[in-house]
Image (spheres, rainbow, N blue to C red):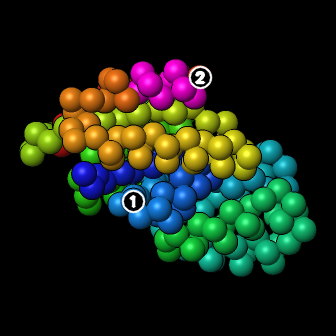
Amino acid sequence: MKLRYAMVCSSNQNRSMEAHFIMKKQGFDVSSYGTGAHVKLPGPSISKPNVYEFGTPYKQMFDELRRKDPELYKRNGILPMLKRNSSVKLAPQRWQDNAHDGVFDVVITFEEKVFDMVVEDLYNREPVLMKPIVIINLEVKDNHEEAAIGARLTMDLCQEIDATESWEDNIDEIIAAFERHQRRKIVYTISFY
């Protein structure tokens, strides 16, 4: 079964893009989104993040930060992250503005507040197709190491979902088996397009 997947995180484009990158290499039909008002990347201090509008090309962000302080942004992993992101797609997209462009079967979020935002967004839309969609939250800390682990776990979970004849009939068993095997708690719900 060929399903469509969406990876959604907050505003820095790390966790969702790492999962997008790995899944795309494996041939999944996948998109990625943020939910914040802007794209926020770490800056020289916690009180001075680099803030970009959604739609700003990753290459532009990369070039600007490389000009500002190449050592800092290489050391903190932002330049490699932006390089990876630009190999996946042109620019970050915001879930609330772009998720209406397609119909997804599975949405994976990486923090509970993003899960809540996606569920609320889908709830507030008028279902037209009455097509089911599962929204799954796999809690992943927002750092480069955890993003890599979370992306591999996400791909494992999505491979299990993709391998079933009918995810709608088997999602409870798939999630339960994943939780037992990976020792991670997952929150999920079903909504409709």
Identify the image quadrant of residue 93.
bottom left
Q: Front-most of 123 and 52? A: 123
Q: Which mark is residue 28?
A: 1
- Give yes or no for contact between labels 1 and 2 (Cβ–Cβ under 8 Å): no
Residue at the location (86% across, 72% down)?
Answer: 70
Q: Secondary structure at mark 2?
A: loop
Q: Is residue 114 above or below residue 16?
A: above
| Element type where label 1 sits in the image | loop
Q: Where residue 146 appears, x then y in whole percent?
A: 69, 42
Q: Which residue is label 2 attached to?
A: 183
Name the amino acid type tagged 1. Answer: Phe
Q: Residue at x 37, y 29 (%)?
A: 174
Q: Is residue 164 left or right of residue 83?
A: left
Whether residue 121 is visible, yes or no, is no
Residue 67 place in picture, x, y as percent: 81, 78
Residue 28 appears in which quarter of the rendering? bottom left
How packed mark 1 is, by other alpha carbons closer than 10 Å (few <14, some 14-19, many 20 or more), is some
**Which one is in front, 25 or 49?**
25
Picture coordinates of residue 192 (x, y %)? 19, 37
- Which residue does the image show at 21% across and 29% down from the upper left? 169
Residue 109 screen position, x and y as percent? 47, 39
Distance of label 1 from label 2 (alpha carbons) = 25 Å
Q: Of all residues shown, which one is farthest toward the right?
A: 71
Crowd class of label 2 (few under 14; some 14 to 19; many from 20; radius 10 Å):
few
Main SS, magenta residues = helix
Q: Residue at x 58, y 47 (%)?
A: 152
Indicate which disc, 1 or 2, sits on the residue closer to the N terminus: 1
Q: Is residue 57 above or below residue 28?
A: below
| Whether residue 71 can be seen here | yes
Is 123 situated left or right of 162 in this image? left
**Magenta span:** 175-182
